Amino acid sequence: MLDVTAIVLSVSLVALVFVGWSGPLRVLLTVAFAFFVPGRAIVGNWPRMGQWSEAATSMVLSLAVLVLLTTVMLWVHAWHPLGLFQVVAGLSLVGLIIGLARRRRRTPGAPEQ
Amino acid sequence: MSVVQNQGDHTGFLSSANSVYKQWHISDVLLPISLVMWAVAVARTDTKVLGPYGLLSVLPLVFYAAIALLIVSVATELTRQRLSRWRMSAHATALVVMLYGTAPIVYSQGRYSWLYKTVGVVQYMGAHGRINQQIDIYQNWPGFFAFAAWFDKVAGVTSPLTYAKWAQLVVELAVLPLLYLIYEALSLPVRQRWAALLLYSAANWVGQDYFSPQSLGTILSLGCMAIVMRWMYAGNSWGRYVSGRQHAEDKFRAYTEKQPAEQVSHLTLVFIALIIVYSALTYTHEISPYIVVTQLGALAIVGLFRPRWLPIALGAVAIIYFIPRFSYVNSHWGVLAAIGSFFSNAAPPSLADSSASISSSQVIVQHCADVLSVLIWVLSLVGAWLRRRSRRTVAALVILAYSPLIVLLAGAYGDEGILRVYLFSLPWSAALAAAVLTPTPRLPVKPRRGGEDGESRRIRRFRAEALRAPVVLAVVVALFLVAFFGSDQWNTMSDSEVASVTSFEQTAPGGPVLAANGNAPLNDTARYNLFPVAEIFGSGAVFGTKKPPSDIALELADQAARSTSGDQPAYVMVTSSMIAYGQNYGTPTSYFTILLNSLARSKYWKLVTRSPGAVIYELPPKTFPKGFSENGPTPYFVVP
């Protein structure tokens, strides 16, 4: 369920950014993305961490990864925030889908946790 | 909260998920009613004119009734034999929403003048896409600002002012699951965990959870501690202290040696994750990484944390990052001079500026904050004594709660050292203090001869002890409300004030600003570094605390021209929040009147902005007052 939520979040935000729509919905989606999606893509492929904590660790890892990447962008004078977003969203989607597929393969027929 | 479902209640009452969730609780009614009352109260709150106690004086009675009802609801839930995880989550969330969600709803602009500076740094990095480490300390620890600048672009907003006022609510909500993970890893009784969460939220009056590096640092710090407590703390599930005198180090070695390769590679991944989170913390905040290392180091010394080399490795990350920045930090903040001055470093901000005459209301507000801090620490000591038999857990919590005091040896952090210590101590102090609020588990109770049996006495005493929770929580929340909202008369900025200052700094030619005092939404644009500020009134300011002369504008023009040498304009700024601050901190309104009248009469100062929230005058370039001399006092302008 969390993986599907993260995928829907990512796709929705990518679409809003692509069409240039702004407003409170885009801000809220960005909050949800920044606080959850990249970390969820990591935790979703890390079963032992996921068993312990699905959302809280995802939040910490999401924030940490984004802080590191954005800071490095500033340091190397390569400030492309929307480009970074597209890369992170794309990689996160790949990670989320791989994680989903792995768990379904391990437990055929079992609902996704 | 996404933690593994706890299978039992450590108070001895085994929980059965089905029976817990099928029953109706009285809190199922009380909690929604309290939330509705809170919503009604917030909708009816008019903040146009705030009194000496800030928001407290304009909040309707129904607001306080809502809080009281929530505490009653919490109490009824805590007295139940079986705790419902989701109901307790709902109560903790509701408390955070009521305490931290009120201000962003009732105020149109973010509280705290210092919030606006962080907005300016974010704007700078977003606009320039680079860092200038010579501007200020924020540019030397850019993690939060880089992240926020990225966020703005993705969210499609032009300024963090759009959402910054909600940061306190978001941060406090984000902290809840992390704290729960930590308390779970420490094997605290379930009831104590929830009480600790409630206490933490109700006692965090410091206000460092605003849109700032410190707030992100708090989340990352707790993230580090959660990972450490789960996987490296030597008293929890995998490293549990099982029998006899087996040392924790042996346990760690035994664990890694006996476990299959998959387990060891998992630990390697945990180390990598920890390094990533800690590195992000290092780039985000100046002090937080050192406090985390201090806490982990203290745990390692007493054998509660393995591997011992990890605090050294983490400390190396922070120090390597700090070394190139040391000269800047030392020259601006006097790190070397402050080392070892423990007691002066520990002085709170209220005492640091003892020359200012503070209003009676603000004295009371500060006393409430002090009493709340002392109360939490005293409760934590009592809680440690009550739970002294659970040695390892209590020892770990005491170490974590009080080891942040060590950082006071290294500096005062702009007179905020003791506030930082409280902030970093709070998660652990609250956990210990929660032991006072919750019944002591599994105390033997002898049956009375001819009276009620031991079991019924135990339950009766359990319920009587559980009354402590609402009483203590009510006292803590009452003190919190005063400490947190009591200064809003000067902590809040009006729309007009923010719009005027922002518009001015977006369009005016850069130049030094003589501000009546520093309490204003200054420096919230990408050009913030072009407007260094010196204060006119207050301790250490151009005119100090003395009554200004009637020709103060002439003297200011003289000093400003000396600073600029006529090469650029200079400005004088007076805003409504400056006047409100002055009224509470020793600058009578008459001083502002003298200043404004003198500026209006002056032939050197030109009015550039006048709105209900702000008045700004400009001394144009090449303007030198009559009798100008290059020798004389010059204000010390800094980018605040």
Image: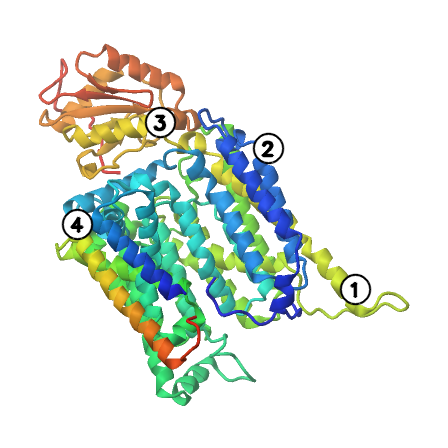
**Percent x, y of residue B536:** 29, 26
Farthest right residue in view: B450
**Percent x, y of residue B63:** 56, 37
Viewer-side label of 2, 3? 2
Q: Residues within 10 Å of mark 3 (few under 14, many from 20)?
A: many
Give the secondary structure at mark 4. loop
Query: Marks 4 and 1: CB-CB under 8 Å?
Result: no
Q: CA distance from mark 2 to mark 4?
A: 49 Å
Q: Which mark is residue B131?
A: 4
**Percent x, y of residue B32:** 58, 46
Q: Is residue B202 visible?
A: no
Q: Which mark is residue B61?
A: 2
Identify which residue is drawn at 32% across, 27% down: B497
The lab-note entry on whether marks 3 and 4 share a chain reads yes
Disc count in the image? 4
Viewer-side label of 1, 2? 2
B429 above or below B364? below
In the foreground, B358 or B134: B134
Tell me the chain of label 3: B
Give the secondary structure at mark 1. helix
Q: Amino acid at mark 3?
A: Met
**Percent x, y of residue B233:** 45, 73
Q: CA distance from mark 1 to mark 2?
A: 39 Å
Mark before the other along the chain sequence, 4 or 1 = 4
Mark before the other along the chain sequence, 2 or 3 = 2
Mark before the other along the chain sequence, 1 or 3 = 1
- The residue labelled by disc 1 is B457
Tell me the chain of label 2: B
Q: CA distance from mark 2 to mark 3?
A: 29 Å
Viewer-side label of 4, 1? 1
A56 above or below B490? below
Q: Residues within 10 Å of mark 2 (few under 14, many from 20)?
A: few
